[in-house]
Each structure stands twice: as C-alpha cells, then as structure tokens.
Amino acid sequence: MVTAGAQLGLDFDAPRLVKVTPSRLATWDDCPRRYRMTYLDRPAPARGGAWAHSTLGAVVHLALRALFDLPAGRRSRTAAAALVDRYWLGEGFRDAEQAGRYRQRARGWVADYAEDHGSDEETDVVGSEQWVSVATGQILAEGRVDRIDRRGDEVVVVDYKTGRAPTTEHARTSRALALYAVATERTLRRRCVQVELHHVPTGEVTVWRHDADSLRAHVGAAERTARELAVAGEALTAGGDPEGLFPPRPAPRCGTCDVRRHCPPGRAAAPEQDSWDLLAP
C-alpha cells in the first residue's frame, strides 16, 4: 500500500529540527509577542483567568473521551449525561445560573451525540486523545488528536467542536487537522487522509478528504512558520531585542488575549471582554 506520507515525499526517519504543535504555530501566526510570552519568557508572565467557552469545551471533550472508552453497548444517553456531570467545572461563567444552564446544554449535547454516534458497533475507535507525531525533515510536528477511527484500510481524524458550527472550508483549510492526519499516519502506520469536524451541539459532521498536494501544502506552510519562530527564538537567546523580534499584531482578538495586561498595543486595539462573552448563544 502506498501511504499518503510516501506520496508527500516525507522522510519519516529524518533528523528532528524544530519541534512544533499546531497550537504553537497558530499562536505565532496570530501574534509573535503572545508566542514569546506564552512559550519563551521565563518566568512566564501572569495570565488571565479561565474562559467559560474553554471550560465548556474541555468538559465535553473529557466526557466524550470517557464515553468512547466504554464498550459500544454501554454508550447510552444516561451514561453520556453522567459523564458531563463527572467532569463539570464552573470556571469562567458569569454566575451559577449561567453555569447551570450550560451544564444542562452540555448534558443534552453529549447524550444526543451518544445516541447518534456512540452506540454504532461499526465505530472502531483506535485512539482517543492520542498523541501523534511526525518528522518531515524540517520539523517534528506533534499533537493530541481528539479521536481516531478505523474505516476499512484507513484511519480518520475526528475533531470535536462545541462553538459555532464549522463549514467544509474550515475542515479543508485547517492546518492543525492536516498535520494531525500526516502525524496519525506516521504514528499508526496506516493511511490517513480524511479529517472530520464533529459539531457536538448539533451532531453535524463536516468531512474533508485531503490529497497528496493539499497535505504537502499544509506541511510546507507549517515548515515556513516553524523556521520563522525558530530563527526569532535563536536570535532572542543570542541577546536580540525581544520587542523587535516578537512584535505584536493588534487585532480584535486582543480583547480575549490572556496576556493583554502586558501588552499596551493589545489593550489599545480592543476592549477587554468578559470571560463568558465567547459562549455560543
């Protein structure tokens, strides 16, 4: 069998150069200053508190991981709702009333998902919150995949979403999902070109199948970003100016940046948002 990695021309045994995760790459692309404060500065600067939407997403992810650790016959609505209760946290919500309302929503979401997707005997889960990695010759890309399913001779990357419903374009353009596909193939030694976004609140599944060209393009973009952040990091270590090497990129997203207190341009770019403002209505 010719794997997607072979079609990409990747040398899976190449030496490691720059270790990256999709999150690190995305942080650099959004704002080099935030990247520096998050990953390089020691001691790390104080960061903001919890965000309600992040708490909600984390609870749903934990519940679904535990759900798919159960045999298919035990993935019931009742079990799913109970798992949300087991992992529930109220951090970041406006008050107890709001937290309780979203807790009930999450119980319903996960229960519906279990009913629609969890009891299918043909859902062959081969990895849940699994760490995968791949060396491409220039980077070591690694990360944790929400779920990996076996579908015939292939495996599929499944990513859970709890915010606004994603589109096919989100699946197609997601560098994180593409890197997860390449890394999953390397880790499991099984062809992986399909990525799926599972919107838990609605149960909708958005699918994209990559080809060798699209995966190569995503890997190339990741390598370019990795080179930029590596060069900046090396220059910083050599005594370079942190402000010049890691400039801010002010944008509306500065309103939710967890290091905005240390960034005057970010504070000027957008008003600070409350910790529950990013909850989907």
Image: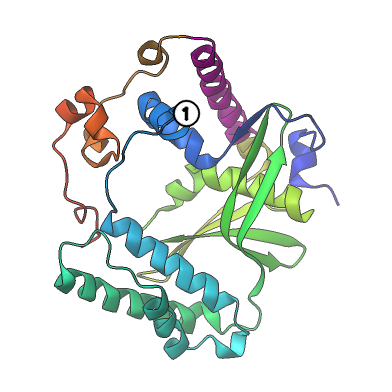
Does 197 sit above or below residue 222?
A: below
Range of residues picked out in magenta? 216-239
Residue at screen point 16% across, 50% down: 274
| Image side of residue 69 versus residue 54, left or right | right
**What secondary structure is marked by label 1?**
helix
Identity of the residue furthest to the right in this view: 1
| Image side of residue 145 versus residue 12, left or right | left
Q: Nearer the viewer, residue 170 or 19?
A: 19
How many marks do you count on the picture?
A: 1
In reply to whether residue 233 is colored magenta, the answer given is yes
Quickly name the residue at label 1.
Answer: 40
Does 214 sit above or below residue 152?
A: above
Q: What kind of secondary structure does the magenta stretch mostly adopt?
A: helix
Residue at screen point 28% across, 54% down: 51
Position of residue 157 measured from the top left corner of the image (x, y, whole percent): 60, 57
Identity of the residue furthest to the front in this view: 43
Position of residue 195 measured from the top left corner of the image (x, y, whole percent): 57, 55
Q: Nearer the viewer, residue 97 or 212?
A: 97
Residue at screen point 41% across, 84% down: 82
Q: Quadrant of the C terminus?
A: bottom left
Regarding residue 251, the answer to whether it shows in the image is: no
Regarding residue 33, the answer to whether it shows in the image is: yes
* Disc 1 residue type (three-letter): Leu
| Image side of residue 98 versus residue 55, left or right | left
Res 165 → quadrant? bottom left
Q: How is the image coloured?
A: rainbow
Position of residue 171 measured from the top left corner of the image (x, y, whole percent): 49, 50
Local crowd at mark 1 within 10 Å, few (<14), some, or many (≥20)?
A: few
Res 26 → quadrant? top left
